[in-house]
Amino acid sequence: MGENNILQQIIMRKHYQNKNAKLLQINAPNSIVESSFVKIGGIDQWITIRGENRNNPVLLLIHGGPASTYSIFNPLLRSWEKHFTVVQWDQRGAGKTFGKNGKDGCGTITFERLAKDGIEVTEYLIAKLGQPKVVLIGSSAGSLIGIMMAKLRPELFHAYVGTDQNAPDSQNLLHKITINAVQASGNTKGVKLLEKMGANRSQISRKDVDKRNRILVKAIRDVPNMITDIILPSMISSPEHKIRDIMDIFKGMSYSLDHLYTELINFDFKKIGMIFELPVFIIHGDNDIITPTQLAKLYFNEIEAPYKEFVLIKNAGHLACFARADQFLEELLTRVRPLAAPTSN
């Protein structure tokens, strides 16, 4: 989707919001549709729970960003709600949680704090929905929170599913992978910018990371552009987000990066460890260069778990679960859902 289509989406925002509002309606007798602030980690945090049958397995999505809330993508995941109770959580410093609490009310934000909040969210869901465990999905920066949660309290989860999985770069492959992809796209200016930034991630500034990501999202033309095809259209057309809510998303992302950037680029995977006490699935876009597919596979190879699988989503880059939601759902139903059969129907 190009800039002209984004402009059209903005002009026809109300139309697309109404269309999505109808899509999101659930009228099944045992359904659940709730959105509210819940006291988590001492502050009010926004949680959305949606599903056609509250006896279905619970699926908790840990959003990336940092602070890039995924509740804007609810219409894209409507088909998932037939098989799972899908939970979106605006983390501390993100989206509606940031809007409610502001900078002063969010407290100190670290990955450890977010993981502890995530455990508290999980315990709340188990108690509220009467489920023994939850399926945990961590996406992009949320995959770091996800693996921390899975290590902290594995007994709370049927499985951990990583997508857009952040991974260590012990062989220093990231720089080469991104240079090659941008070179193949014919963007010589982009190649020069990446070469100037250098290979040392810990020395790259926030400003340069933003530049790098803008170059990379345009480099693979055979997959949906995560900005113009996925994020912006979903943000504009979400019936659950007013203009103020959208502004809070951007403010929260800036605020959260102030707190998390250094930890994000220096994340210590060895400290977390490679041994997991629950099934682990990495379901990754086959052409992701934001969190490169090759690095995710190398990380997967190092992981020890009672059961593990690495699955590619075809013709997908970053945010594969939204870009190819139906294909991703098929993999969840085939591989993950059997571990979390519904309590009753």
Image (cartoon, grey):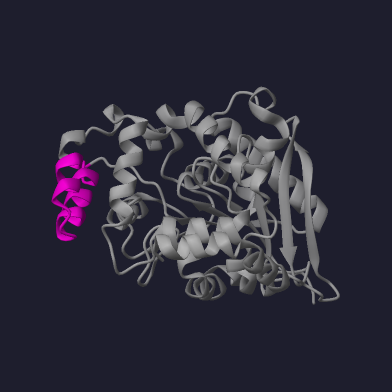
Q: Position of residue 187 (x, y in %)?
A: 17, 54
| Residue 220 lies within the magenta run | no
Would you say residue 227 is visible in this rendering? yes
Please tell me which residue lies in front, 103 or 106.
103
Q: Main secondary structure of the magenta part?
A: helix
Q: Is residue 11 left or right of residue 242?
A: left
Which residue lies most toward the front here? 11
Q: Position of residue 320 (x, y in %)?
A: 44, 63
Q: How many marks?
A: 0
Q: Is residue 211 left or right of residue 65?
A: left
Which residue lies most toward the right here? 29
Question: Where's the N terminus, which quadrant?
Answer: bottom left
* Quadrant of res 10: bottom right
Please tell me which residue lies in front, 158 or 77.
77
Q: Is residue 190 above or below residue 80?
A: above
Q: Position of residue 201 (x, y in %)?
A: 28, 34
Q: Which residues are magenta?
A: 171-194
Q: Position of residue 301 (x, y in %)?
A: 33, 55
| Residue 184 lies within the magenta run | yes
Q: Is residue 334 left or right of residue 196?
A: right
Identify the residue shown where x is 42% and y is 34%.
264
Would you say residue 73 is visible in this rendering? no
Question: Where's the C terminus, which quadrant?
Answer: bottom right
Q: Is residue 303 left or right of residue 120?
A: left
Q: Is residue 233 above or below residue 31?
A: above
